[in-house]
Amino acid sequence: MESEQPLTQLSSQQEKVLVLDFGAQYVQLIVRHIREQRVYAEMVPHDTPLERILAARPAAVVLSGGPSSVYEEGAPTVDPRLFDAGVPVLGICYGHQLMAQVLGGEVEPGQQREFGRTDLNIDDPGQLFTGVADKTTCWMSHGDKVVEVPQGFRSLAHTPHTPVAAMGDERRRLYGVQFHPEVQHTPDGPQILHNFLYDVAGCKGTWRPSSFIEQTVAELRERIGDKRVLCTLSGGVDSSVVAMLVDRAVGNQLTCMFVDHGLLRKDEAEQVIETFAPRLGDRFVCVDASEEFLSKLRGVENPEQKRSVIGEAFIRTFEREAAKLGEFHFIAHGTLYPDVIESGGDGTATIKTHHNVGGLPADMKYENLEPLRMLFKDEARQVGRELGLPEEIVRRQPFPGPGLAVRIIGEVTPERLETVREADAILREELEASGVEGLAQWFAVLATMRSVGVKGDFRTYEHPIILRVVQTDDFMTADWADLNHELLATISNRIVNEVPGVNRVLYDITSKPPGTIEWE
Ligand code: XMP
């Protein structure tokens, strides 16, 4: 029975905010920004019955944006009793319009969309805009607008095209903002969220990695009992954090298997072995399957086919090797919150089949353990740090499951792997030494076309390396990083001089969309 499942991961005594999801693309950014204020937040479907919402005892409720218009037939709505339940509510964009409409204000259908950075004039700071200048900027993306506030509300701010850009009923602790405080283009967004959480909703800010660890370890211990757990280490931060947590919870009952598919970056396999072999002793099993993977990839050029060959090879290796280790009841995965949200089946088009090495057959007899399923990547990193994982692993960038195979455009061969690995290591070394901050992902791609060049007195006919460096918060959209030219020159010089078989270095200046972050 669905109602027996708890609505949130936290108990009713623990401080939390529930974000009702009305379908905006960036709902998870709202959740993330609230957690950055040290308040735990979780997304729940907009049609969650009010009784369940109230039973979870949220410190506040946020109504997200969404693509609908309150005028559409069947537009998602909210139980009006929510606004009388004594819970502080913040409506954002569609949530703001919905709050106005449900409470008797007036929403006008949009003749004209207001989109992008917009001047915001604060007319009445109240609690929500304390500490925000009278004139600031915000990010707008809407058609409909609130033109009259409901009874008990005051209009707090306007923009050139939106008379009620924010409204509030201080007594009932109900607020609405037409703009998006959760995106970077609203510079005062964090302050506004902070004001809502702490001043309006009276949050204490109890969300910390250490409290997550304590609670998760206790839960794992209880759920696992005396059974055995298998954890597949991929070389990335997520599975490493899972292994550390389960190890802390049940020690000897955990066995970790690291399948080295030979497609990792330079030194990565070694770092995993150095970290886990001493800690786990013979409960750490390293399977060197690189030859098997490479031979299966021979002659494969199509990106989707590469992914499926690798996924399949992983499953075969896993089944064969796990059988040698005896019986396990649980298998532990490094699933994160964005994966949970994305696999929610919202019908978006498949751009690439994202394959996580560690993605196992659906008919497996194991029970799944996913202790990180409510965390974002940066939170998983903080937890890893607190659990004593080395920085090289904690700071590891996201890396596709199929590894370097999707960073070689064309067939994967041992020589090409060596080339892209060395070029990638130089890029990483130089970026780290430069101290540039705020980058999300950076790597080298090898194109298998060749071009003419000259080295010394000799003509060369070799491959180009493409550098891909991006900034992004959510990996759904990304900007190419405008790196300093001197730094690019250093990287380029080193790669053409130090990596055999490469005579050109290109810098990818394509955003996502229309590009994707990876090349395949
Ligand atoms: P794209 O290329 O789709 O990448 O813009 C977005 C993010 O996802 C990572 N990525 C993958 N991760 N398995 C993964 O686990 C995959 O098959 C895969 N393909 C892309 C990519 O590195 C970026 O962080």
Image (cartoon, rainbow, N blue to C red):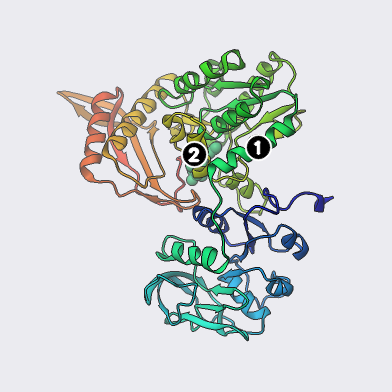
Task: List the residue tagged with mark 1.
Answer: 370
Residue 453 location (% of width, % of height): 23, 30
Q: Is residue 181 visible?
A: no
Q: Amino acid at mark 2?
A: Arg
The local crowd at label 1, few if under 14, some if 14 to 19, many if 20 or more residues have their Cα within 10 Å, is: some
Which picture quadrant has residue 328? top right
Residue 96 location (% of width, % of height): 58, 74
Residue 278 location (% of width, % of height): 51, 16
* C-alpha distance separating marks 1 and 2: 16 Å
The answer to whether mark 1 is within 8 Å of ligand 1 is no
Residue 19 location (% of width, % of height): 62, 60
Q: Is residue 500 left or right of residue 307?
A: left
| Above or below, 323 relative to 202 | above
The local crowd at label 2, few if under 14, some if 14 to 19, many if 20 or more residues have their Cα within 10 Å, is: many
Q: Is residue 96 left or right of residue 481?
A: right
Task: List the residue tagged with mark 2.
Answer: 381
Which picture quadrant has residue 485? top left
In the depicted view, which residue is nearer to us: 439 or 227? 227
| Above or below, 473 relative to 417 | below
Q: Secondary structure at mark 1?
A: loop
Q: Amino acid at mark 1?
A: Glu
